[in-house]
Amino acid sequence: MRTIAVVGASLSGLYAARELRAQGFDGRLVIVGDEPHRPYDRPPLSKDFLTGRSGEQQLALSDAEEIDELDAQWLLGSRARGLDARDRSVLLDDGRTVSCDGVVIATGASARRLPGRELAGVHTLRTLDDARALRAELTAGPRRVVVIGGGFIGAETASSCAGLGHDVTVVEAAPLPLVPQLGARMAALCAALHRRGGVDLVTGTGVAALRGAPVVTGVELTDGRLLPAEVVIVGIGATPNTEWLADSTLALHDGVLCDDGCVTTLPRVVAVGDVARVGGTRAEHWTSATEQPRVAVRNLLAGRTAETVRPLPYFWSDQYGARIQFAGRRLGTDTVRVAEGTVTDGAPGEGGFLALYERDGRTTAVLSVDRPRPFMRARRELGRGAGAMEAAVP
């Protein structure tokens, strides 16, 4: 291959570019990014960056030396608008065309927004520019903040806002946040962290409308309540960035459909990160974005699926001074028990806890709150067990 285009100057896109060079690709490497920024670390956006404990320099994922070593052509601030499968060309919105022999799709996902007109004071938190705008507003003085969505981004943002001294309410449509990820019992324990952090958690009701014009003044709930707000943060999930591929012949369904090796339905086109549905699953986690590129690049250079990827799912979240860590694949029928630590009054006790999910006498997943060392040990054991089970499958 003479030219490979990485579409998406994201975490997964940067890792793919690194892998291309590490695995011996010495041709022309083009990296296309719709943002004007080089790849940056997104997890701190809702935490240290939002609270001002770190700046933009700490977000950078590469330095000048690595940029030189990659020897890539960076097309930043250029949005991809199409993929011509016939000659494998990436079409850009400024009229340029990148002709290439191989493509890595790493365009990530975009924050979902509430329907209706846009109001000042309403924010999402997905990009550096989002975080800049929100941080500027939060540092202008005490605000009444309503966070819509109790998932990890919503909880982390609520935690940061509370730490800055704002009056914060989290609205979650489900009876509890994080039930799909953790199950009802463990989700209840993690939800108690909001109370510990001085944040009101409103559950079991949705948002009917935002009030105010042109600046938001409140959030009307479907149960009739009105929550006053000067700042509203919408954290209701993300949508994979596949609109630019709509006219291509790629198979799309809540992401770019790939086999277990990140290989798409088009020859010499692979996908990684939040945009990729690998083996039937789309995982919006930091670990997936960093682990998939090695396998995807190997398969791209080989021209076939020579290797598959099935890492043990892992994610973490920092909220209210606590670190939540989860690894494994749980089912709703799994039992869960607290193996270490204590639970007091329906909340994590002093020193946190370690919980094990179990099925048919074996551990399927592990969750911890403020137990990093026991968690890492359990995660390693879980990984060895999963590897042994896969090896035993004929």
Image (tube, rainbow, N blue to C red):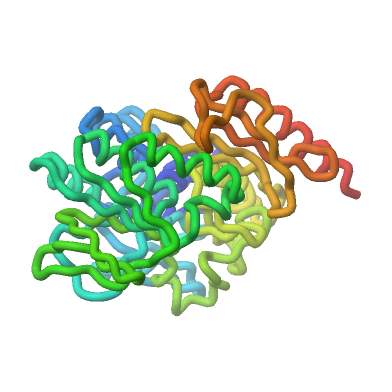
- Give the left or right position of residue 218, taking residue 91 as reference: left
Residue at image location 10% in from the left, 70% down from the top: 213
Q: Where in the figure is residue 212, as x and y percent of width and height?
A: 13, 68
The answer to whether 356 is drawn above or below residue 251 in the figure is above
- Residue in the foreground of this view, choosing between 238 and 359: 359
- Residue in the foreground of this view, choosing between 256 and 238: 238
One can see residue 66 in this view = yes
- Residue in the foreground of this view, choosing between 62 and 196: 196
- Give the left or right position of residue 233, taking residue 223 as reference: left
Q: Where in the figure is residue 17, as x and y percent of width and height?
A: 45, 43
Residue 138 found in image quarter: top left
- Give the left or right position of residue 149, taking residue 133 as reference: right
Q: Where in the figure is residue 309, as x and y percent of width and height?
A: 66, 47
Residue 226 found in image quarter: bottom left
Residue 288 found in image quarter: top right
The answer to whether 149 is drawn above or below residue 114 in the figure is above
